[in-house]
Every structure is written in structure tokens, then in C-alpha cells.
Image (cartoon, coloured by chain):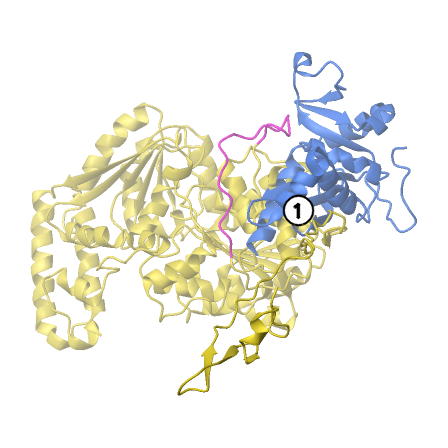
Amino acid sequence: MATPDTPAPGAVQRVQSWRATEVVLPTTGILSRMVCQLPTPAALRLPIGVSRPTATTVPLLEARPAVERFLFSGQAAAAPPSRPPVRPRIAAPSLPAEASADAADPALRRRTRIAPPRDVVKRSERFFFLLQPDLETILETSRLEFPRQPFPFQFDGMAFLVPRHAAVLADEMGLGKSMQAISSLRLLIRSGEARRVLVVCPKGLVSNWARELADWAPELVVAVIEGDQRRRQWQWSLPEVPVKLANYEVVVRDRDLVAELGLEFDLVVLDEAQRIKNRDSQTSQSVRALRRGRSWALTGTPVENSADDIVGLFEFVAPGHLNDRMSPRELGAAAADHVLRRTKDKVLKDMPPRLNRDERIELTAEQRETYRRAEEEGVLRLAGLGQQATIQHVFELVLRLKQICNFDTATGESAKLDRLEAELEEIHASGKKSLVFSQWVATLGRLRERLSRFGAIEYHGGMSTIARDDCLRRFKNDSQHGVLLLSYGAGAVGLNLQFSQYVFLFDRWWNPAVEDQAINRAHRIGAAGAVTVTRYLSVDTIEERIDEVLRSKRDLSDTILSQAEPPAASGLTAEEIFALFRLSPPRRAAA
Amino acid sequence: MVGAMANSTQQQVDQAYGFLTTVDSPSHGLFGGYLIVDLEGRPLEFHCTAPVRVSRAQQILYGATLHGHLHGRQIGGTLLAEGGVVPRLVLTDQEPLLQARPHTQLPLALVTASQGAEQAGPTAHAGFSLGSLTVVPHATDRADETVLREHLEGLIQAVDLNEPFERIRAAIEEAQRH
């Protein structure tokens, strides 16, 4: 085979030169020689061996996985490791299970999990909650017994409160907020997480709370802070008492004393916490001044009149978490992490129904005439005041007219009372009990006189605590007392009157939430049967006009709690109050 | 023997119980979790592994031995070596985890829902019933079955034996989210 370096024999004689890329041939004639370019020959490679295969290593499962370790020894159920004080956010509570509790067999009973609050971010702290036994097991192994088996939603309420430092339990009235709070604080005390607890409630509910604490936490020693200053100072200073119970007025009065004593509470529970919605009030400032680790607020009406209410409430629960600049939707989103609210229709499917009746009452002829004159004179006076008219002037007229709707000031006639008396005849004959609410103590007195044959007795803020307790005891236990006459102020909150099956709102309160509270004295857990609620409205009077405004307010609370847009009307504005008489407010009143 | 395996570095706690399980996450792999509780079901320790991923090649190479190796040695053996508190016994709700027994000195038993005798295989050890559950000790521990049963009878007064596994799963699910 010829190669560039070694031409084949014979070819050499004709080829002048031979290189790798050209061949030079001898010629004759003009050209002495001819050079022909040759294409570069393609390389021809012949395999001389087999290349090594790529080695694929399949690792065996020898390396042990990394392990994270979490130790919980010696820690209480309610105390996550290294938990910083206050300001947690709240995780949604565990959903109620379908099955009911069955204490006999752990495998069959309902399990309520204590979910970690949302702002607990450290994995070890979240694991701490997730790895706890269910609440039912914790309660059972802690030997904490209940006088009555709590409802599943009440276990959920406890699972909500126990891990939280900032919580608003906003259940509808009658669902047992106090029982849930007591059971939760009981767990904290049992676990050692709380040693000093302060419960603050309205004055009229102190004895009620004392009873509830004795009922649901009989092992806890409770000191009621009351009496003169010297006695209160001694009571505040009691070191070995885990639970102290005080009313709001005492907390305001003893604000400096509590500070001087250097008292610090592991938990402060506010009942009827809507009382602190006004941030500038002494009540709000005094409870916010309490040094505390946990802040729980109990209220069935976290939003009574306006969105500001819940901002005020949160100044105690989680200062700075909400602010006035937030839209209702933003407020709802931020508050949702801290608020647990259930309504009876959602959690008590089998609770007796509440039957509402709006009875429109025609005033008697004499009442109508008295009413007409009073309204005309009042409106003329307001018009005459012009820019000098104030909301106070309008309120005075409203109150005057409402009183006439109750009783004719000239003759004492009352179309409402005539109707009420007739209805009570039948109710009393059936052995059922009734609650009658009015705005005025004086009205209660007149009702009592007329309704004495039904054993009507009064309950209002003008009575001593002892007298009120005695009144409740007689109404509950003595079948002769078929009617309890209550003022909205004293009787709308905290009382358990579920043995009553009829509620009458003799006149209307300004706020639908207060009316709901009143109604829920009877329509609550333990109600024996359907509760009939009768609201009297005098036809073609100020009562009807107020009712229209109240209807537009009724949805505000739900709006914020459901993070929806608010309705146009969120409360009785100055314009609305003046509009009750078709008047325009003066400019400063409108502002 | 039951309860006699504490080494010098481990803490003796009266009446502690271990619960061992795995959670298979399609996106992460196989997690192992080991919870030690006291007689009232309260957590004393929790250990969890990083997820272990098994390749297709490993599945083929290990064949039928994969589960035993993965659950028993890789995860179960690793976790059981971690405990500071020595439990009286360890329960699992997954049969492959029983293969951790050769890698630990702790007695190990499987908890299952009770099944009728007709469902058990002719050679299978039936274990013993506790309420609605059946406990099947590892073959190594069958001689101690009576003692194990006594230990568990105390625990089930407060704790449903299936319930702690739910807690482990919840914690591992939480670990995947954060």
C-alpha cells in the first residue's frame, strides 16, 4: 500500500514529488510540471481495543440519617420550653370531632388537640404542643373532674385558651365562657404554669363568679377583693391564694395600691370585657396597668357599636396588635388569630329553639295623646334651639317619649303592661317562669306592683349584692315567684337563668348586643325547652324608629368577625339620632 | 430482659414507653419518629430523622430486604439508639419496624387492630389483646409477653395505644411544613 513517504513501486518514475497533500507530476510542452492539489484524506480510525464502561455506584443504605432530638422531661403540659412572655398569635382551634366523649375507653373517646399558637415558630415549641396527649387525657390524668360533662365545643375552647397568652373568647352568650375560662386556668394552675390569677368582672357578677369557681374548680382557694381599703390591701397581699376575684371598680380604685404592692399576675381574665372598649376610660387604663403574663378577655360582644370596640379590647389583650388605621377587613384578619367565637346555632344543634316575637302595641288613646303632645313640643323646642341643639337634648326627648310608651305620665295607662299582664296569666298558669327587662328601675317598680299576683320580684343595680343573690335564689327555687323583673344594666350580663322560658323586652335598649345578652340569660346551655322572646314595640312611635336603626347595626359584629365588609351603618351616629325627629344635626354635633 | 437494658448514659425513668413509626412523604422521603411518653401519655422525649430517600436502583438491589433494612436498621435502629430515657418497651404500628429489634436491646412490639383468629396465619404469633388492639411482641421478646402485658395494662388506663402514633405523624407533618 502506497503512503506519502513511500510511493508504490512504478509510480515513482512518473511522480516528481509526493507529499501528504500534493502530487507533482512531470509534463511536456509549456508547463514543465503540473501540481495537483489533493483533498485532505479523511482519517480512518480503526478500533484497537474496548473503552472501559462508566461505573455507576449505587450507594447502599449505610449512612444513618440525621436525628433531631427534643426533650420534654419535667415540663408541664401548658408550658412550652423557653416560652417568651405575652404577645403570641393564635392558631385556629382544632375542629370538633364528631364523636362524643367516652371516658370509659380511651380508644373511643373524643380527642381535643391543643394546637400550637400560630406565632410559636420554634420547632421545639411547636412539637411541644403537638406531642402532648389530647386534652381529655390531660384532664383525666390530672384528676380534674367536672361537675357536668363539658360539651365538645367547650373542650375546644379550653384547647384554645390554655396555650395562649393573648386570647379573646367571644362565644355567644350562654355557651359557658366562664366555665371554659375557669377550667383552663385550673389546668394552668395544676400544671404550675400559673400561680397567681386575677379574675375581673362586673360588680354584680362577683358572687356569680365565686359560685362558678367553686363549682368548676372546687380545689382552688379564691379570695374576693372587697371591703374597705385596709381589708382589700390584706386581700391583695395574700400570697398563697391562687385566684383573686375583683370587680372593675375595685381594680380602678386600687390601681396605685396594686402597683405599690408590686403585684404581678400570671394570668388576668376579664369577664364582660367589652367594658374596656373605651381606651381612655379609667377602667381600661387600670386593667391595662396590671402586670401580667397572660391576658384573656371574655365577651359575647367584642364589637358592640363600632370597629373601635375591638381595637380597645386588644389594647389589653395584645397591645398594639390592632390599630385605628386598619380597615374592617384588616381588623378581622388580624383579630382572627386571637379570637375564638362560636354561636349557638353552630355548636348546639340540639339546643332548644329561640322563638322571637315582635309585638306591635297600639298605645291607648290617652297614651297616644300624651305622646303626640310631648313629641310636638319636643321637636319644636329642638328646632327652636337651632345650632344650639345637642345630642343630649335629643336623648332627653327620646327618653321622655320612650317613658310615655311604657306608661302614660298623665293617667298611668300602659298598653304594654295590659298586654304583658294578659300573657303572663297563661304562662304563670302553666308553671313557667318569665324574665321582663326594662331600661328603667322605676318602670320595674310599677310592673312589680301590677304583677304582684305572679310573685314578681325585682333585680337591679340599686340593690345590694346580698339582696340580689337572695332575689335570684327565691326566683329559682320558689314556684310562687314566676316573674323576675330586671334592669338591662344589672340583669343583662352573667346571670344563668336558663330555667326561664319566656323573656319580655318591655322597652328597647339602644344596643342590640345588650338585648341579646338579656335574652341569653334564659336561652343558654341547660335551657329546658324553647325560649320565647317577646319584644314590645309601640306602633308609630320613637320605638319603631329606633328599631329600624338597631336592625342596621345588628350585623356589625359578625362583619368584623367574619372579615367581611361592614354595612353602611355601624352605629347610632349623630345624624341618625337627629334623624329620629327628621332634624339635621348642627355641624359640630355631626362632627 | 425487659427493662434491664439501660446503659450508663441513659436516664432511668419509671414507667416510660416508646412509640416508633415512620411517615412516608412523596416529596421528601421516609421520616422516622420516636416518641417516649410517661405513664400518663405525656411526652418525655421525641426524636425524628431527616427523610431518607430510596432510589429505584436501591429498591432493585435491596429487593425484598429493603423494608427491613430501611425501617429496621436505618431508621428504627438509629432512633432507638437516641433515647435518653429508657422505656419499658417500644411499640410500633408498622410491621417492618419490628426489624429494628436486632439493633436495640429494648423490647419491641407491634400494635394492630384486633383481628379474629381466623385471619391470623397458621404460623403467625397472635400476641395478646388489649381492649380493641392486639399487641404482637417481636419473637425475641415473646418470653417476656406476660411482663409486657402487665406494663401496657397500666398505660392503657390513660392512653389509647394507637394515639401517640397520631402525635408523631402530626409532628412530622409539621416538620415538613416548617
**Would residue B18 be seen by someone viewing this image from the given angle?**
yes
Does the stretch in magenta take in A549? no
Say if A464 sits above or below A308 in the image: above
Q: Of helix, strand and loop, which one carries label 1?
A: loop
Q: Nearer the viewer, residue A24 or A138?
A: A24
Q: Position of residue A49 (x, y in %)?
A: 69, 55
Kindly identify the residue that appears in the image at 67 percent across and 26 percent down.
Answer: B112
Left of B66 or right of it: where is A459? Answer: left
Does the stretch in magenta take in A94? yes
Label 1 CA crowd tier, 10 Å (few <14, some 14–19, many 20+):
some
Chain identifier for the yellow-coloured part of the image: A
- Identify the image quadrant of the N terminus of chain A: bottom right
Q: Residue A348's image quarter? A: top left
Q: Position of residue A579 (x, y in %)?
A: 13, 62
Q: Nearer the viewer, residue A275 or A138?
A: A138
Q: Nearer the viewer, residue A36 or A348?
A: A36
Q: Which residues are magenta?
A: A90-109
Q: Position of residue A67 (x, y in %)?
A: 73, 53
Disc 1 target residue: A220
Left of A301 or right of it: where is A191? Answer: right
**Would residue A131 be seen by someone viewing this image from the given angle?**
no
Chain identifier for the blue-coloured part of the image: B
Q: Amino acid at mark 1?
A: Leu
Dominant SS type (magenta): loop
Count how many numbered circles sit on residues in the image: 1
